[in-house]
Image (cartoon, grey):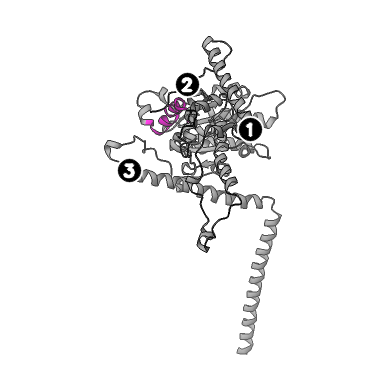
Amino acid sequence: MASSDNRHWAHLVQEVIIGAGTLISCFYIARQLLSRLDPDAGAKAESQKKALAASARLQSIFGGNQKQIEDDDAYSSDEEDDGRDRSGARPEKEDLVLSSYEQTIAMEVVSPEEIPVTFNDIGGLDSIIDDLRESIIYPLTHPHLYSAHSSLLSAPSGVLLYGPPGCGKTMLAKALARESGACFINLHISTLTEKWYGDSNKLVAAVFSLARKLQPTIVFIDEIDAVLGQRRSGEHEASGMVKAEFMTHWDGLASSTTKSGAQRICILGATNRIQDIDEAILRRLPKKFPVNLPTAKQRRQIFELTLKDTRLDQSTLPDGKKALDLNMLVRLSAGMSGSDIKEACRDAAMVPVREYIKSTRGQERKPRDRRDRQRGSATPNEEVRGLQTDDFFGRRSAAPSTRTESSRASSKTVEDSSEVGSTGSGSTEEVEYFDDPA
């Protein structure tokens, strides 16, 4: 009798275990099937990955900035205080609660350490750099110096850099992000473009909500005319809604103040088509800086800055002229942008290297041992001549007779232009001559 009862209980326990296992298996199978049938499953997984990536990016940026501030505090004395406001520190990663749209915008945050450009790398734009420091960097990073005197000294709501292509607008923005110390959001057009109705508006709102959480913040929009161009009657509805949303958050009700006072957010735009920007947007960009083609003095600064690490030929030619005449290069580069001058210097720097390669091609070389072959042979600097004036603008590649005639023609053109400039008619730019540095 006892044995039959034991078998009965054993059978019952076995049935319970099998039933529980079956239920658990059915639960997980149904869960997997429902997750595959869920149309938002991929979006949820992508959102989780995006949240982790955004959190890691903000942590890397803020962690590096905090470490830099601690290092500066450790090595600076009271007499060498930089005046930076550290009372309103940015929130830690644990304090940041980001929505899914803010996580998308957080991927556009740029770390200053990732940008190799500083204001010292920009030539000929000293006046604009000084104005940018006074208009953006100082009010954002030293608010206690400005708010104590007048609210009029706060940072402007927007700054616009406009001018021809290749004159240094984007480079100024890079240097500004590097040296400002403020949170820099490099906003792309593709970031604000979504296929779902209303998502673009929510992304625009997320730009400003994230900027308020991370302030002081600079939001940079390159080619701003493509995003915030003039509103037209035939424009798509979604584009008009994005512009309206942007303007509302930029300068709308209660957009300029927070609980702690005036918000430290600045919109920085760059364009070469200022006439295509909407008038309401231009009104929200009170500070406008024209970045025009460089003058003769600015071109000389650009040449000196670009060629500072290049070997130059400082000798004198048999005819008494300098092998590298910066004054001639300045005159020949009239009407060129800073980008054009940099490319001209790049092409000219290849001429001595090309000559060296041609002169050594086919010559017998001594066999190298295995270590030299693995390490490679570096070309000694003394075997490659320095840069000369004729290396620029394809002057050396021309035939000697042609080059002589072109040199005479260019000299005559310079003389004629100087004569016309002295009479004050028919000249677009005054020819400037510089004394050789002592």
Q: Is residue 259 shown left or right of residue 186?
A: left
For label 3, the residue is 73
* Residue type at tag 2: Tyr
Q: Secondary structure at mark 1?
A: loop
User: Crowding at label 3, few (<14), some or many (≥20) Cα neighbours within 10 Å?
Assistant: some
Residues 212 and 300: in front is 300
Residues 6 and 84: in front is 84
Q: Secondary structure at mark 2?
A: loop
The percent coordinates of residue 67 (x first, y second) are: 39, 47
- With respect to residue 11, does 437 lie above or below? above
Query: Which quadrant is the N terminus positioned in?
Result: bottom right
**Which of labels 1 and 3 is toward the front?**
1
Instruction: Give yes or no for residue 334 being in the magenta stretch.
Output: no
Range of magenta residues: 123-143
Q: Main secondary structure of the magenta part?
A: helix
- With respect to residue 409, does 79 lie above or below? below
Of the numbered discs in the image, which one, if any, rests on residue 399? 1
